[in-house]
């Protein structure tokens, strides 16, 4: 009777692992546009927030955009910048206020399927997710086009991708 019980436990454990590792989850991803290679990925939950920080090309001052993940979309909800320059300013969307030397625009709702971005050499684009900052130039060459968005995959897919991608950190 003991071996039958051990066999049942083994089958239960095997089924549990298959379920856990094979269950699809959502991922925040950075994908190279030219070859669709995933260069960075992290598990993500609906409604989570991430930030894109960079140095503006004209003002040479910091900009921080706030994005929220909503039903597979990337939604720009706020932006803040230290100085007004080309492409920076109030466009009539959301509310604007000043905060300790920053201009802050909140209440924006720009929905995108993914965020297209040219990785800047001077801009030093940084993705900030769950309190950790990732320099995009480390994962994709400067001036290359990447898409920041969400995708679905299993834990097994992610483990394989992490193992196969030697440049992956953290």
Image (cartoon, grey):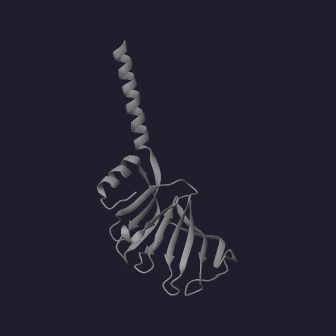
Task: Establish if 19 lies above or below 102.
Answer: above
Q: Position of residue 57 (x, y in %)?
A: 48, 84
Residue 110 image point, x, y percent: 59, 71
Q: Nearer the viewer, residue 53 or 44?
A: 53
**Residue at position x 66%, y 71% in the image:** 106
The quarter in which the N terminus is drawn is top left
Q: Is residue 24 above or below residue 125?
A: above
Q: Position of residue 138 (x, y in %)?
A: 37, 68
Quadrant in the picture for residue 135: bottom left
Quarter of image, res 23: top left
- Farthest-out residue, front: 100
Image label count: 0
Apparent side of residue 79 relative to residue 119 in the rendered image (left or right): right
Give the residue at x 59% y 80%: 82
Most distant residue in the top direction: 1
75 with respect to 161 (left or right): right
* As drawn, 41 above or below 115: above
Percent across and percent down for residue 126 are 46, 70
Q: Residue at x 57, y 87 (%)?
A: 85
Relative to 24, residue 78 above or below: below
In which quadrant of the rendered image does the C terminus lie?
Answer: bottom left
Q: In the displayed structure, does residue 82 sit left or right of residue 146?
A: right
């Amino acid at each position: 009777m003991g071996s039958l019980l051990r066999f049942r436990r083994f089958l239960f454990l095997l089924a549990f692992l298959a379920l856990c590792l094979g269950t699809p989850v959502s991922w925040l991803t950075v994908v190279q546009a030219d070859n669709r290679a995933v260069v960075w990925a992290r598990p993500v939950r609906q409604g989570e927030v991430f930030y894109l920080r960079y140095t503006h090309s004209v003002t040479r001052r910091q900009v921080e955009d706030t994005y929220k993940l909503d039903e597979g979309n990337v939604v720009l909800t706020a932006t803040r910048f230290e100085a007004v320059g080309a492409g920076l300013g109030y466009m009539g969307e959301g509310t604007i206020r000043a905060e300790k030397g920053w201009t802050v625009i909140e209440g924006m709702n720009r929905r995108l399927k993914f965020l297209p971005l040219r990785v800047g050499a001077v801009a030093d684009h940084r993705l900030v997710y769950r309190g950790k900052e990732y320099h995009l130039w480390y994962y994709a060459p400067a001036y290359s086009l990447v898409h920041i968005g969400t995708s679905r995959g299993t834990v097994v897919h992610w483990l394989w991708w992490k193992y196969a991608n030697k440049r992956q950190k953290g």
